[in-house]
Amino acid sequence: MDTLSIGNGFATGGLSVWMRKLPAPARLPPRLPPRPAGPAGAGPPAAPPSRPRRRRPACRPARPAPPASAGQRAPRVAPARCHTGRVIAGQVREELEHSADPAGAALALERVLRSHPDAGARLDQDTALRAAVLAVTAASPWLGRVCVTDPAALDVLADLDQPLDLVRYAAEPTGGPPGDSRPGAGIARAKRLELLRIAARDLLQRDGIEQVGAQLSSLASGLLHLAWELSRESDHSEGLAVIGMGKLGGGELNYSSDVDLLLVSPPGRADDPRAFLDLARAAWRVDLDLRPEGRSGPLSRSLASYQAYWDRWANTWEFQALLKARAVAGDPTLGAQFEQEAADRIWGRPFGAEELRQVRQLKARAEQEVSRQGLSDRELKRGKGGIRDIEFAIQLLQLVHGRADPDLRSPSTLPALRALAAGGYVAPEDATALEAAYTFLRTVEHRLQLYEDQQVHTVPASAEARIRLARVLGYRDRASATALGQFDADLRRHQAKVRWIHERLFFRPLLESFTSTTPSARTQLLPQEAVVDRLRAFGFADADRTFQAVRELTRGFSRSSQLMAQMLPMLLDWLSDSPDPDLGLLGLRTLTTGTHRRDQLTALCRESPEAARQLCQLLSTGPRFARAFERHPDLLAGLATGNTLVHRTRPVLDERATRSLAWRTGEGAVERGLRQFTQAESLRIAARDVLDLDDVDATGLALSDLAESVVNTALRLVGPPLPFAVVGMGRLGGRELAYTSDLDLLFVYEAAAGMGAAEAAEQAGTAATALVRILGGHTPATGLYRVDTALRPEGRHGRQARSLEAYSAYYQRWAQVWERQALLRGRIIAGDADLGGRFAALAGEFVWGQPLGPAEVLEIRRTKARIERERVPPGDDPKFHLKLGPGSLSDIEWTTQLLQLQHGVAETGTVAALNALAAAGALSEPDRVVLVDAYSFCERTRNRLGLVRDGASDSLPTTGPQLTVLARSLGTTGSGLRDEYRRHTRRARRVVERLFFGDVAPER
């Protein structure tokens, strides 16, 4: 074959004499279509110059090779054939072979040579220009098109040290699509050319990630100011100040970032910013959603309006966003005033546990969305171990400590991280690892966005696209690993390290301060004031108590102590995101007091971090969890295996209850075994509830199944010598038991063969008393449940157990309407099935045998009104009473029961009855939805309040720690919880007044 020996060949033969062997990393991914001709696009590629119709193309691209898998080396494609059959030797061949995309670069260079007559000579003579052209065309088809379409592109690449004169280039809107005279076309062109220069310096490794971000931000600021200057000519934005937010404000813009802006109008004027925005959008995607009221708010507002909004309505995340607020264009005086006022609002307000919780919840929701899309491992920005993890952690520490330490107030990520490390707020080794990961992840993000100037943050799924990305990042195949293998390994390593540090970052320096007596050569201990500030911000109100707990958890030199010291930063982080961090830490401390429990706890942390996180959530919700785990340490191990959180069906409960008592002898031992079984199963149900594994209906059903199983087991222990049945009433009968519910029971019996009436009554009374004693215990501390038998005929003055004939006689002669209402929820739960069936038939005839008359309806209404006036305990606010307040549980239950009696709808549970009433046409669908939603909300809140207060309570706390803990446990804030209560109960009360009282509500 022939070889040219004159120079490098650009001037004499163009690409027609290029080498025959062009290595390519793989079959390149299909070229993305060029961005539509728009404000920031480079325009479509220029058409090739006209040529004779029969002329063959100078160089035919090679047929692509099949795609490579992640473990394969990049295949080589067949040579690019040229009609001359000649190849070029020398330095150019080597440069092209080592580029990221030889075939793509060759095609782009062919177009450059066709478009610019002098390009061949310039590339022959200027090795620096040639390197820049090869770098940008191999990395970015989009920038390759810029080189083809803009006559100034090669001039820019020939002098990478000289920033563009933006004003001059913006005034010469050439180089875009022919005839492009759009407003702002010159601004768009200036952006493309300066970005080309910045990208070339980046790809040639002349600038690091910080310098690239700063130059991109400077470019954006310059063009925004130019757009403002031009818009002033139309007198639409005179005096407007342009505030950069997000990455622009932080001076760390991406290649394809939106520019987040706030616009500030001069005092007393309502400037129209649309002329400015039209020009700015010629070059950038402008996002104004961070403004007050978001998309519903005005585009610009005065500084006084911003101040009023910040002082009255702004959310915590909005103050977090203001960390990066920086005047970037427009009126400099007004911009400086905005910066000062924003700083005063950020650093002049406390940043406590509630504020921290709010912003962490927002981040958690974003992570959940990424996970839902299946992108957690490939998302560079929002995925686990991604850019947002680093930025978020730094911003939180700035907000916590920046009030006291002005050195931490940098709007830029890496300078802020270095300041945190210098001040001892972050361990030096963590800061070093985070900076390395941030640099790597941002570099990958930049290379992705350069490909086609698209706002992407996700590593491609296909191996072929990732191979190309790896090569653009500088990876090459080696004997020990492919380019793709190296890239994937580095990505996983950085993501895992970031996530590991993120989960421990906030508390590692605290533990060093707690456990170190002298600063080591590598660690600067956190100042005591900063320790207290951070603990309070993360919900630990008592620094001294936290100090003692940490010391106790990490004392000793055993393996378990060392493991606990390693896990404690993560445990404290989980606790800080829990309802009551102090209570949770106290619970952990309690569980380490016994050797067996301590071993169980450390094993749990070692084997299942997720189970350890669940334990922190449970311990911080209420005291009963720590007590239960203390009494049943085997349940700790069950968290790791998942056994503790398994749902138990009724047959399984019966079998386990029988098995737990089978080996015990003696009355005390058997009752103690039944108590331990009940406590363990109650913990299981509560844990599933708190961890959101069950909704409120499933929780009520599980508690009811457990109570029925316990009643049946207890009745077998009693062993009545005659037919005997237990009727569940109230919430137990409706299968919607709560944690603090009483067991409302009726006992019915029948004389055994040969047994007289008196003997039967005595035997039944003895059995009922024994059953109540087992369930209620000798003392409240030893009881399983509180038992209430007051719904029996004649109430507390009547016999505890009655015969079937006595019930029949009573219901026929003396029963009142409220007893019909109560029997709506009656259900046989234990004992003789035949006797129970006959009682159910008797009760059904009493309830449904006669229609409800007007006098009976009036009596039900009067009784309900009397309850509303008299039953709310003194000191409780009736407007926030979960059981007896307007529109709360009692209102909904009574309304449901009245409608059931009026329309003959038989159901024992309230929600089930509401659904049945709607199905029967007795209740409209909108009314059903309102009542079911309010009932579910009040019942769930009441259940959780019982766990938080560790006892019966029906009144929603008004203020204070209990309201805060309750709200956190339910995933909201104190004010948010009370607002939600008002919303549900007001709607429900309107339905109740219409359906129950007939629009004539009683006086309260």
Image: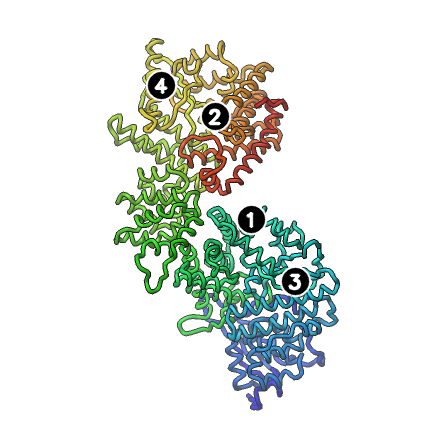
Q: Residues within 10 Å of mark 2 (few under 14, many from 20)?
A: few
Residue 326 point in image, percent of width and height? 58, 61
SS category of the residue bearing label 2: loop
Q: Please tell me which of labels 2 and 3 falls first in the chain.
A: 3
Is residue 330 something one can see in this rendering? yes
Q: Amino acid at mark 4?
A: Ala
Q: In the rendered view of the protein, which quadrant contains the N terminus?
A: bottom right
Q: Earlier in the sequence, mark 4 or mark 2?
A: 4
Q: Which mark is residue 315?
A: 1
Q: Which dot, 4 or 2, sits closer to the camera?
A: 2
Q: Which residue is mark 3?
A: 331
* Residue 712 drawn at (x, y percent): 36, 26
Mark 1 and mark 4: span between their CA atoms? 58 Å
User: Do callouts 1 and 4 mark residues in contact (Cβ within 8 Å)?
Assistant: no
Query: Which residue is at a point 53% across and 37% down the rendered structure image?
Result: 978
First of labels 2, 1 by sequence position: 1
**Are there few (<14), some (14-19), or many (20+) residues within 10 Å of tag 3?**
many
Residue 34 position, x and y percent, is 64, 67
Q: Secondary structure at mark 3?
A: loop
Q: Which is more N-terminal, label 1 or label 3?
A: 1
Task: Give the CA distance from mark 2 to mark 3.
Answer: 61 Å
Tell me the kind of residue under disc 2: Pro
**Label disc, if present, on residue 768 of the rendered structure:** 4
- Look at 39% across and 41% down and name the residue there: 645
Q: Amino acid at mark 3?
A: Asp
